[in-house]
Image (cartoon, rainbow, N blue to C red):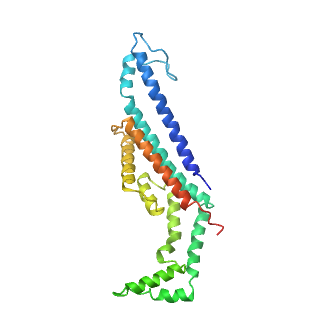
Amino acid sequence: MISHTHAFDRYRKLSQAHLDFVVLVCYAVPALRADLSTSAVGVSHRPDHFRSANSKEALKRCAAIYQGELGRSTLIAIFSYFESYVGEAMRELSDFHGGDETFETLAQERSETVKVRVTKDMAMRKRKLQEYAKKGKDLKYRDQSHLLDAAGFRFPTELFARYGALKFLEKTKEKRGMRAWEIPDLLEQCFLFPLSEADRKEFEHARRLRNSIGHGKAPSAPLKASLQIASKLHNLAARIDRYLLEHFFVLQRFA
């Protein structure tokens, strides 16, 4: 039994690395502030990678707003890691089933199989459903449908499996595949993932903030709020991963 996808493992490690960096900065800035409060002309330690040190006044100004800047960078990084996770998990799913060509072939073969398994009895019952629905016959239609379903008959929407597989594979392409705004619909419509209205609103809020920051609008993004978003995205990713493993990471090419 697979415990988690490789995509989730990468997402978790990248997210943790950034959060470790956030913790480091939250330790470093208070220590720097203490250094800046002394009467010495400069600070105790010079910065890495910079030959000339900023003045104490410039550093004080930076320290005063560091949480906002750290909050913005955290939101961009963590959301990007989440978006990447979803795309990589989808590609990993295709690879699990043997790659794109095999995945498409499996869907095609399954579609063909369900069409040829119609017995004479099933065909007779199916004929009774091949008419425009008439008033007063709902109960008869329902009875025939239940009997067909119990016999293993596949109804029209199930024959779209190959088309659905093709559309899924289109979204796994890196250049012209999935976009962040499509993630909620893909989860619900493609994977039938139980996405709540709260999940959708939280995701959309994070996506809009990320876009605003990325487009230079620089909205307020307090560090505490960004860390809360990071936590919610991690929880959502963990739920998605468990769901995908339970329902989609099931070997089919040996069936």
x, y percentage for residue 167? Answer: 49, 64
Q: For the point 55% across and 41% down, which residue is it? A: 13
Q: Is residue 76 above or below residue 48?
A: below
Q: For the point 54% across and 88% down, which residue is it? A: 121
Q: Is residue 154 above or below residue 99?
A: below
Q: In this view, does 109 lie above or below 132?
A: above
Q: For the point 50% across and 79% down, which residue is it? A: 149
Q: In this view, does 221 lie to the left or right of 25?
A: left
Q: Nearer the viewer, residue 227 or 64?
A: 227
Q: In this view, does 115 lie to the left or right of 186?
A: right
Q: For the point 42% across and 39% down, which residue is it? A: 227
Q: Which of 231 and 210 is in front in this view?
A: 231
x, y percentage for residue 253? Answer: 64, 66
Q: Nearer the viewer, residue 169 or 10?
A: 10
Q: Which of 38 and 146 is in front in this view?
A: 146
Q: In which quarter of the image is the N terminus?
A: bottom right
Q: In which quarter of the image is the C terminus?
A: bottom right
Q: Indicate the quadrant where residue 67 lies.
A: top left
x, y percentage for residue 20? Answer: 51, 34
Residue 149 visible, this orientation: yes
x, y percentage for residue 38? Answer: 40, 12
Q: How many labels does the image show?
A: 0
Q: Indicate the quadrant where residue 92 lies.
A: bottom right
Residue 174 visible, this orientation: no
